[in-house]
Image: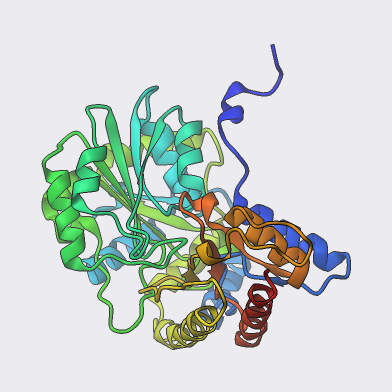
Amino acid sequence: MGFIADALARVKPSATIAVTNKARELKAAGRDVIGLGAGEPDFDTPENIKAAAIAAINDGKTKYTAVDGIPELKAAICAKFKRENGLDYQPNQITVGTGGKQVLYNALIATINPGDEVVIPTPYWVSYPDMVLLAGGEPVIVEADKSTFKITPEALDASITSRTKWVIFNSPSNPSGAAYTRDELKALTDVLLKHPHVWIMSDDMYEHLVYDGFEFTTPAQVEPKLYDRTLTVNGVSKAYSMTGWRIGYAGGPAELIKAMAKVQSQSTSNPSSIAQWAAVEALNGPQDFIPANNEVFKGRRDLVVSMLNQANGISCPNPEGAFYVFPSCAGTIGKTAPSGKVIETDEDFVTELLETEGVAVVQGSAFGLGPNFRISYATATEALEEACTRIQRFCGNLK
């Protein structure tokens, strides 16, 4: 009998974290590496939010809090959902966790029984299938259209069985940046209305990062009849440049929220008290920096898409949101890299790109769809331009 739990054999480490760590190791060894693997804004946390955290420390707000969030933060989240999404939640319908990942994990642990299925569209955030597996469930992967990175209502309907418990929905998407319009989302929610045993886990973490006048909507907003079986997940990491503060939250049915609190009470207990007070200020305070940051992101997106589409063998769609692009490298498959290695997969492509040109990206197969790779453009414009120049050179040198 082995010492390590058998359940861990079902999962793999996060590919995005692995790429980020590899880039750090190469930098530490003296290599000139541009890391485009991490989904982390390079903007600093706004001053008013930092000031709120400092005030919390000075005011002695450094003790244990309620397991799943202080009342003030829950009130701010309720106000946010009403103000921005037209969703009415009470404090007992709100949970706060140590980042959005913990909130998603708590929900799965609290609801999944052996054999339960969770529908996950591709390309998916790397952690979704593995969290389902850790919870004892079975991921059911639905392949998206490779040109739009969106699933059709027909594909969603065909994936649902009597054992389906959840559909995980992420728009705008990590890794593709694709976002569903209101009409596209309504077509999917119409399918879900036909299956009253299926719940919706909507990961809205990139809600505020949309471009070109795109209107963000969330499932329970588009179809109110799904309100009682939807968990709407969000957080302060991306829009507020608070990745390290680790605050995620969700609104949903009170019974589910109570069960998730039970899981959290026996794992991490409360999120950082100081980060919670900072999040109160983030949600209640000025929001004017968000569109200003988005203009910078949009410029970076346009730069990256243009330069990648000028690289031999690369095709890069223009995403609606988030801060990722998910180009295809199908045109490089079968070619030989400067090292003499034949590129047979997208993993080969990203490995050779890192070794040859010092550009760290993540292979699309880690997100369930390839041959592609993910670039995060949440980094300095100068670094992005240099990285894309190196990618162009790498592709140009393939034989």
Q: Residue at x 39, y 71 (%)?
A: 283
The structure residue drawn at horizontal position 30% and vertical position 39%, both measured from the top left corner, is: 166
* Residue 3 point in image, percent of width and height: 71, 19
Quadrant in which residue 162 is drawn: top left
Point out residue 92 in the picture as x, y percentages from the top left corner: 29, 47
The residue lying at 32 percent from left, 67 percent from top is 179
Residue nearest the observer in this picture, 368 or 323: 368
Its colouring scheme is: rainbow
Q: Residue furthest toward the right?
A: 29
213 over 244 or under it: above or below: below
Instruction: Determine whether, in the image, residue 324 is placed left or right of residue 255.
Output: right
Quadrant for the N terminus in the image: top right
Q: Residue at x 22, y 56 (%)?
A: 219
Q: In the figure, is residue 382 to the left or right of 182?
A: right
Q: Quadrant of residue 361?
A: bottom right
The quadrant of the picture occupied by the C terminus is bottom right
Residue 220 in view: yes
In the foreground, 193 or 122: 122
x%, y% of residue 286? Answer: 40, 82
Q: Can you give x and y, in whole percent of width and height, for residue 304 in the image?
A: 53, 81
Q: Looking at the rendering, which quadrant does residue 284 occupy? A: bottom left
